[in-house]
Image (tube, rainbow, N blue to C red):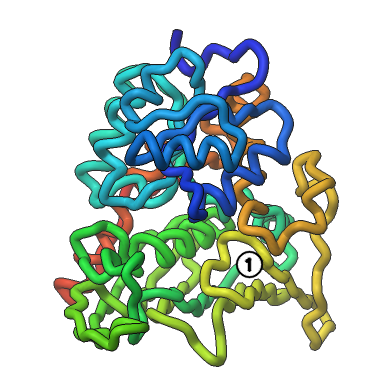
Amino acid sequence: MTSFSPPQGPIRVGVVGLSASGGWAAAAHVPALAGLDGYELRALSASSDESARAAGEKYAVPLTFSSAEELARSEEVDLVVVTVRVPQHLELIRPALEAGKRVFSEWPLATDLAQAEELADLAHRRGLLTAVGLQARSSPPLRYLRALIAEGYVGRVLSTSMLASGGYWGATYDDSHAYLLDVTSGATLLSIPFGHSVDALAMVLGEFREVSAHIENLRPQVTHVTSGAVAAKGAEDQIAVTGLLASGAVAAVHLRGGESRATAFHWEINGTDGDLVVKAGQAQWWSGRLRLYGARGNDRVLTELPVPAAYQRSLPQWTERSAEPAYNVVHEYALLRDRITGDLAPDTDGFPDFRHAVRRHRMLENIREAARTGRKVTLTQQGS
């Protein structure tokens, strides 16, 4: 059975990387699955039998496994969700695809473009439905923003500017995030915060057709938050990209490592007839808590634009929960559920699957090339 066959009953989910000590899976995926009809959190895997049992008891998950391979082989799992660190994605996703399972992987899909292509090719050969956690695409405010642009709220888009902080990759580090210092880990300012940000920009305004870039590591040494030990950092902490969108609009995106006392996230869209602004008070803005403002025509002052209920995707119970990490994740799960059940056709609505992840990984490679060569790079084969 391919993953395009609608399941009988709830979609049974197995999570790779759910820990009793917390983490992203516990903060976002567990509440999202619990707060959405059509799913059952059926299984989990961890690095040992003991840690798997502890997580199973804490989250009331009936099936626990000490390896992702065992979970993938279980006949009681329909969808494998991979929520571990990026360097482990290839070794944990591949067995699930080989077992014929649908897979939802957090972003980035892999440490580099070659690995992402390998996983996407394997999924395609097996005819498997996939998803990648670029959850800003599912954000109700951003989907409303895209509709406003399409309806001509600002007229013709002339330019867009995005300024954001990365949260990590600043002056300090801790033990759990030491791997972010290594540029070869695939977990970098470019791949994670910039990847989420530029994917949202492309979803709303269309893809870049050409870019110029600066990628710099201006803090090659960083300090441990408690011990004061100094460590070498090879990963970038400043990214500045300018270019033209397919529409001809001018775009500028600047990501800074660490935190800013001034701006966590600010995105402007300027057009011939109006302006739109998106703001967030935290670095990981793609998790939710977005505020949308606009003004057009003779209006000289921006006003907040409430998101219509239609953009909640029949999830009114989440309307007041936009500050939770699960907010955009639950909306992506709703889209994925509709694809699995056949209520949403493949390639509809710009859903981010593994093929889309490859396009985004390729774009990031093009940006690195532009920064390395100091030349403008024309982007090709960038999907929606």
Dot 1 falls on a residue whose secondary structure is loop
Residue 40 at what x, y percent from top left? Answer: 63, 27
Q: Residue at x 38, y 71 (%)?
A: 243
91, 45: nearer the viewer: 45
The residue sitting at 67% across, 59% down in the picture is 324
Q: Residue at x 63, y 52 (%)?
A: 326
Kindly indicate the quadrant of the structure image that contains residue 336. Answer: top right
Vertical arrangement, residue 383 with respect to residue 129, above or below? below
User: Residue reaching furthest bottom?
Assistant: 261
Above or below, comparing residue 334 to residue 265 in the picture: above
Residue highlighted by disc 1: 156
Q: Amino acid at mark 1?
A: Arg
In which image quadrant can residue 379 be found? bottom left
Work out whether 69 lies above or below 268.
above
Whether residue 81 sits left or right of residue 317 in the image: it is: left
**300 up-or-down from 342: above or below:** below
Residue nearest the observer in this picture, 370 or 32: 32
Residue 18: give x, y in percent of width and height: 47, 43
